[in-house]
Image (tube, helix red, strand yellow):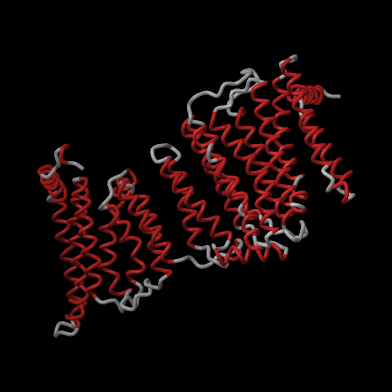
Amino acid sequence: MSESSSFSLTRFVRLLYTQNPFYLIGTFLILLGLQQSLGQEPLLATSGLLTSLLAGYTVLLVLIGVVIVRWGQLWDDVRTILLVVVLLFYMLSTSLDVHVLESPSRGTALLLCGLAFCLGLSEFLLRILRLQLPAPYRWAFYLSLCLLFSYPIALAWLSDYRCYEARSWVIGSFALAASLPLLALIPAARSRTAVPVPCAATWQWPFYPWSLFVYLTVGLGLRAWWLTISFDPTKGEGNSFHPYLLIPLLLVWSLILLEAGLVHHRRYFLAGGLLLPAAAILLGYWGPGSSSAEAAFLARVTNTLGSPPQLAVWSVLAFQAWAYWRTASGPWNLASEVALTSTAILACMTGKHTLDWQTLTDANPSGIALVAAAFMANAMRQQSSYRALVAALLGGCYLWLTDIAKFPADPDRFWLMHAPVLVILALLSVFRDQLAALLRNFAVSAIPTLACVAALAYPWCFTRTPLLQFTVYLCFLLLVSFRLWLLDRQVSQLFAFGLTGMVSCLLYLWPAGKMLAESWLAAGLPYLLVGLAVVVAGIAVSLLKMKLPEHLWNWLTQFNEQFQLHPDEMG
């Protein structure tokens, strides 16, 4: 055996020795054996023997835990035992389903006795082991136990009174009801007070006491599935359980993790709180299901509340809006904003007939417009140009979806082609953040270039577009150029403004040329134009010899200095 493999084996054995998972593994094997032994005989399955054996085994584990702590101080081992006991509480509740269905009154008494047994045993453990569990944790734990044992009582009486439709709603709402007691953990997550631990060397926050509620949540999720087996008429053969029913449990843990991460500055908690809703989205878009019971309950939910993807995406959207507000002043705000925007766009593409990713609908124009308006409002509030650009992009999607972009007065699609440039230039003239300042540096040379191209080439390229529309376009470029100079007061921007105005005048060479072509000068017009061009070239050479560009730049610099803003006047 090589040295590396020997080292790995040693580490594995040490891990088994320190963590001692044998209580958990052995419990699963015992439960499997009980199921194989008692599940084959109907009389044994309904005799109450399973419940008695589970209760006895639970008491045995509790006594073992007390002994190894009192005489051995083995807190690592007792931690595993306590978590196994929590799962056994779930099994005790499940084992009584058959009794409450056969006789609601007798089953109610048994479930209440089971609840008292679990509550009493839990309190005994807390006191005998001197575990100081703060009030929010106790409330969440005890209320969850009450739900585990009281929910079958309600379902049994609904079945007894033949309220089958109400029963199906109550079965499907178990995870929602189970998430309510867990909300009591939010004050605990926000608390900065350290939870007293019996052994600081092995029991550390957050593993104590949060691992207790992780196991409890697993049990609640399993209980949501098992209720559809015990109380559905199909008895597990194509029951109505669907993964989207577990979404409330995921969202309540998202709340808890996000609050804990914000208060205790744990980035892994924050990341978990922001990523768990993505899992909720995946559960919501799981699909239509495969059984007739699933299809029947799905139709009832869709007709009454909406499709599961709708319920999932709107629930996640509400959470992410709250998360965006909570992370407003932190480094995670951008991640929250991206998640919120993505979910909002997904909500616009989710309809009543959406069941999975293949059945997404066309985007709702009103929803896209609402998202664009929200982005623009946020951009104005934070003076953020990139948010404004996203809002403009979403606004363009809205125009495209509503066919407003196909404007009849724009036969050459001139305005449609230039809308992105116009929007970007308009935003540069409003916002003053870093991105806007960077783009303004490019706009100094881009605006005169755009004006020159428009004046010289557009009347030839866009033959069906009136000259007046080109004039409006050039005037807009001129106004933006002037506004950019007002913002930064740089000589280059002032020069760009003047150059834009001069090249814009070249637009009217086209109508002037047409008018001359129809006049008495038509025969010699080519020679006249070439001659004028040569003379203009000569004038340009003379001006260069006179160093007019340098004098012009100096004059613009002096002119610009007279209009420089005082630092107190800059906004």
Q: Residue furthest front?
A: 105
Q: Quadrant of the N terminus?
A: top right
Residue at point 44%, 48% (across, down): 321
The structure residue drawn at horizontal position 89% and vertical position 43%, both measured from the top left corner, is 37
Seen in the image, is 2 located left or right of residue 230?
Answer: right
Q: Residue at x 29, y 52 (%)?
A: 428
Above or below: residue 178 compared with residue 72:
below
Residue 423, position as x, y percentages in the image: 32, 59
Q: Judge left or right: residue 310 versus residue 424.
A: right
Q: Nearer the viewer, residue 479 or 16?
A: 16
Q: Quadrant of residue 65?
A: top right
- What is the quadrant of the C terminus in the image? top left
The x, y position of residue 384, in whole percent, is 33, 47
Left or right relative to 437: residue 514: left
Badge count: 0
Q: Nearer the viewer, residue 51 or 336?
A: 51
Residue 552, above or below 115: below
Q: Quadrant of residue 110?
A: top right
Residue located farthest toward the top when viewing the structure as drawn: 71
Q: Quick one: 539 or 196, which is closer to the camera?
A: 196
Q: Where does the image place residue 198, in percent across and percent down from the top left?
A: 63, 19
Percent x, y of residue 471: 22, 69
Along the line of sight, the residue nearer the viewer: 375 or 291: 291
Which residue is found at the position 51% from the left and 41% from the top? 255
- Is residue 439 left or right of 203 when viewed as pictured? left
